[in-house]
Image: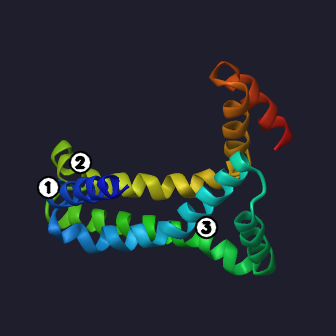
Amino acid sequence: MALWAFMSRDLITSLIYQHMPPRHWRLALFAFITYLPFLALFLIATSGAYFGETPLLKSTMAALEAHMKIGLLVIVALPAIGALAIIAALIAEMRDRYRSQTLRISFIRDNFLILGLTILGLGIVSFLPMHDLVPCVFHLTLKDGAAHAWQAFQFCRINS
């Protein structure tokens, strides 16, 4: 386990230092922190779909139902704020550093990791309408096999 932790840390560190300009480190950290609550909740819910109702899933869902406004803030607003902050910073950089209002290949090449974080944040926000569908399809595909993934999707689309 220690080997995997070391390898993961080494991979993340090399990605950040070799492929992300230092001016984006704080922005990437801010975006990652705003995405973390959603990602943690997503992992808990997906594990609940796979393992059944666990005590962690029950207590998490009970806390979210009791504090719906805070839960909505964590699930919707924080990832949207993180993605919008990255978009605003990238637009400002495109205007100032690249002297252009259009997207160019050099800009994408220089900023592909931070653009990936932006796509992740927008994906989180766009994922919300399908939040019941994905764990259902995941569970049925694991239970029935990958050959039945389309039938699982059709079943979950109707019943979720």
Q: Residues within 10 Å of mark 3 (few under 14, many from 20)?
A: some
Q: What's the residue type where badge 3 is placed?
A: Val
Checking the image for residue 76, the label placed there is 3
* Nearest the eye: 143 or 29: 143
Quadrant in which residue 60 is drawn:
bottom right
Q: What's the residue type where badge 2 is placed?
A: Ile
Horizontal and vertical percent position of residue 76: 61, 67
Q: Earlier in the sequence, mark 3 or mark 2?
A: 3
User: For the point 19% across and 42% down, which residue is it?
Assistant: 105
Checking the image for residue 108, the label placed there is 2
Residue hosting label 1 = 18
Label 2 element class: helix
Vertical placement of residue 156 versus 15, above or below: above
Q: What's the residue type where badge 1 is placed?
A: Gln
Could you tell whether 141 is left or right of 23 in the image?
right
Horizontal and vertical percent position of residue 152: 74, 29
